[in-house]
Image: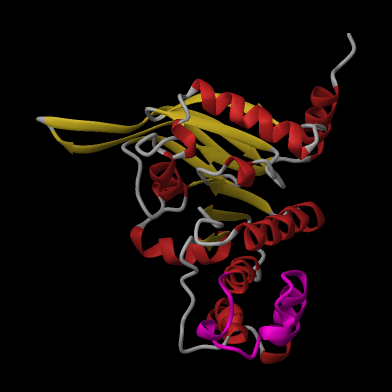
Amino acid sequence: MLLSKTERWWSKLGSGNKILLQVENIEKYYGNQGSVTKALNQLSFHVREGEYISIMGASGSGKTTLLNCLSTIDTVSAGHIILDGRDITDIRENEIAEFRRDNLGFVFQEYNLLDTLTLEENVALPLTIKGLNSEEIDKRVRDTADKLHISDVLEKFPYQVSGGQKQRCAFARAVICRPKMIMADEPTGALDSHSSRVLLEIIAQLNKDMGTTVFMVTHDAFCSSYADRILFLKDGKIFNEIRKGEKTRSVFYHEILDVLSLLGGEGIC
């Protein structure tokens, strides 16, 4: 039987890339016995090493709760989350900070840069905390800044640069320790359309060139069109899943809009 282009692409990805993240029947409840809200409802999926995944859904669909659970910011009520062979639902409280530092990189909508440090110092901070020598820190900061197109503003403070430059600095800080996965929460939410496009092109290039695994939550269909695969959540469950394969980004973008229309446009509000 002949395989479609998408099936051939996915088969190729699957044959050479191990499963990095396995989510198994996770549930998350809030409230008490009299009033329980189920934010995640027996959710299962996996992410392969080097994939670029986007999560979409309306407010209350569970996407932020999912990101928080995967990031060890919150805990699940049931089920298992396995990252690179380790069940993170069993991690002890005193091990969480080290686990995040060694395995995850974070990018937030509001940058979360330290205003009293230059961009160079912000990018270098994770390496400084890890105790790397100054020569290695300087080399990695320069290399990473070059990839993120912020080399010319490294000596400036956050208040002296644009929102796009701040977010690229935040992404540089997230990838500089070479984490297993980048967790991005609405990374373009505070940016104008030009800055968003620049950042998304850079993220896609890093994903391709460095094999950086990206897990992104967004309400923006244009933002999601850069991903390899999109999971649409509704009521804490996967409503639909689509893959880019060998489609152009434009074709994939319109496919995303079609799925969102089935959700009643809920994912774009």
The answer to whether 239 is drawn above or below residue 93 in the figure is above
Magenta stretch: residue 180 in it?
no
Question: Relative to 16, does residue 160 appear above or below in the rendering?
Answer: below
Q: Is residue 155 magenta?
A: yes
Asked whether 156 or 130 is in front, the reply is 156
- Residue 60: where, in percent of width, then height? 34, 37
Question: Which segment is the magenta one?
Answer: 136-163
Q: Is residue 265 left or right of residue 188?
A: left
In the rendered structure, the answer to whether residue 138 lies left or right of residue 45 reads right
For this orientation, the residue located farthest to the left is 34
Rendered position, 51 above or below 108: above
Q: Point out the residue furthest to the front here.
A: 193
What colouring method underlies this structural image? secondary structure
**Between 126 and 215, which is closer to the camera in this rendering?**
215
The quarter in which the C terminus is drawn is top left
Q: Could you tell me which residue is drawn at 38 percent across and 55 percent down?
A: 73
Relative placement, left or right, of 65 versus 255 is left
Instruction: Give me the residue at 54% from left, 55% from top.
Output: 184
Residue at 37% x, 56% y is 92
As drawn, 55 above or below 207: above
Which residue appears at 60% of the width and 30% of the height?
257
Q: Main secondary structure of the magenta part?
A: helix
* Quarter occupied by the N terminus: top right
Relative image position of residue 165 (x, y in whole percent): 62, 73
In the rendered image, residue 50, in percent from the top left (x then y), is placed at: 72, 47
Residue 72 appears in the figure: yes
To which quarter of the image does residue 130 belong? bottom right
Q: Is residue 179 in view?
A: no
